[in-house]
Image: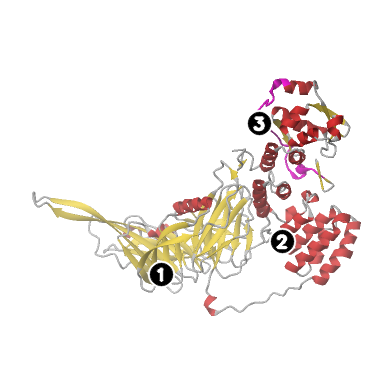
Amino acid sequence: MVKIENKTVDFGRELNAPIQHTCYDFATNRYGDGMLSLYKQGEMCDVELLVHGESIKAHKIILCSASNFFRVMFESKFRESESNRVDLSATFTDVSNLRAVLDYIYKGEIFLTHRSVVEVLDVSVQFLLHDLKVYCAQFLFEMLQPQTALFTLYIARLYDLRELEEISQAVTYSTFCRRLIFSKELVSVSAMFLASMLHDSSLNINAIDRVELVLHWLSFDVENRQQNAEELIKNLLQRNPLPINACTKICDTFSEYDSEFRDLLKSEFLKPLQDQQCHLEAKRLPSSGSHNSELSWCVALQEEDYDSVAFYCMRNKAWFSCPLNCEDLTIIGFVFPNQLAARMHKTQVYLVDLTTGVSKSVANITRMLPRRNTIGENTFDFFCDSGSLYAIITVFSEPIRKPVFKVYHYEPTRETWTFCMDVHYEYFGDNMATGDQASVSLKMCTGQFSDHYLKVTVSTKRRIETSSAKTGVHEYRFVVMKNFHVIKVDPCLKTYKSCGVRWHDPVSLDQLPTLILSDRICFLRLDHELLAEKLRMSFLAQEECYVDAMCLDLSSQIWEKVTIGVPSPNVTPLPMTIDNETFYKVGVSHLFNRLFVGIHTAPHVYQLAVYDFENFSATLLPPTSLPSVNNISFSTLALPKMEHNWMTDASKSLDTESFCFSGCLLKNDILI
């Protein structure tokens, strides 16, 4: 226990776990077993330390050698130097904490608990014990959880623990939600600290939550905090006006508080709130015709061992949650009315009802293939357009054996695939001869205005007959030719056209990250894993990442080699050392003209950066609603313009049981 602003604080009151103990070993027996034995037996002692009537005997020379605080006290003409009695009742609430500090001074060990660590930290500052201060910070770091992050942040700022402050701030801003507004940890924070936090736009709570946070803080000490609370709420209303019926919601929130506090709210706070309340009216802004067909994007996050998917929708600028598990599925897109199409393995597709979480399998598309006409390996891809599910599959036509891409449309009412259109491949060259082999790799990608581009790589292994000039013997050799093509496909109008072709490119561009701009298509010449690793290194180094790309001009159909600079995300690596491979991972996805980069910087802290290559801008999304303590994978998908009844506001999910920072180290010269 420790007194801060005349309030008794129990740091562990919000921990959903037994009392946690730890012991840090320093230079053991720094003064030898002899002095330690004398201290334990109380022999040859020349000073007495008092805490609330209880005393512990010690040696001046040991105290002075460890702490300049005692050295100044005993070398100067303070009364303690003459009486040989030091009353530390104002410093310690319990004599056991004094005994723990003396154990550290004598033998270089200290036994810390969550109940004593803040008081020991305060003593380390007062007694000028820098090493002890560092290890108290380490202990607070290992005990860090979402429900204690706010108080840890306050302590870190109060005692200038900069590394701990940076980490606890990241955890606070990533996890703070309505559930934590009424935490008992608020009992001790100052008005200045509360003001700095509430005025920070990074804190992801709304205006009503911010007002209720101030009122809950006020309830701990009405007499001394009322004036500060009135000033805080006044400043909040100037920045964030309250919506309609906000006062009614606030009254309901504090209905269980004592009657005296409720009367104070009604007389001093709720009436001014009603007077200043801003009645907001939603107005529809006319949209220009050029954006009528523009698609919105959506990010879907799935956390390992967590049966819910978090969706961030650009149109709503908010997180939504659905109770479903897509760990083993690859998300394809949205299907009308409220379904999510996802693929398992290669051709098995499921439709997941987003309102109930129930999934059902889709008829296998391979049954639609004319098997007798196929040669080589068939390649598939699935995509969604305007709320409908499509499949594209490669077959080889007879007798010329050119690949044809067949597009099928899935009809949910009939639960069957129906033929939609053929996309004929126009650049195959001569007919295939006996012994020739061809393979096709394809991928469909979507532009922001419902444009679909088929990326195709055709590899032809052709047998060529030659004869030796010396022997006249006929020999055969194989030549591999690889060509890449881009074809624009409109499954609704059943039309297609070639956008460009690249001959003899050794790289299969169809599987690479692709950015579709208004006038060109950029193919980044790194696969997703290599790009993610390169971005991770640039993030750790806080440097710009440069990626080679091939760009296809859609008007001239000319290819150009370029280098694209991707700035490091506006995310700072946290000052900690962690062995868990889950963290400092980077994930990459792409959609339209945007590159999405997910960074798992620490337990509870997952951040998504969105790069818009059309407008040369970068944005950090708000913290996800997932706990963010396990591996996270994400995908991006186009959001068609239709009603999405499954979208319900996602409340933040918190892991309040695990001590995820246990075993990690703050990056401090003394600790590393």
Q: Give the label, 3 or 1, closer to the camera.
A: 3
Q: Is residue 424 visible?
A: no
The residue lying toward the viewer, choosing from 354 and 39, is 39
The vertical placement of 460 against 239, above or below, is: above
Q: Is residue 192 left or right of residue 548?
A: right
Total marks in image: 3
Circle 2 SS class: loop
What residue lies at 49% left-to-right and 65% top-to-bottom? 613
The kind of residue on which mark 3 rests is Phe
Q: Is residue 304 left or right of residue 95?
A: left
The vertical placement of 90 against 237, above or below, is: above
Residue labelled with disc 1: 488
Mark 2 and mark 3: span between their CA atoms? Answer: 41 Å
Q: Give the label, 2 or 1, closer to the camera.
A: 2
Counting from the top left corner in percent of width and height, residue 409 is at: 46, 66
Counting from the top left corner in percent of width and height, residue 262 is at: 88, 59
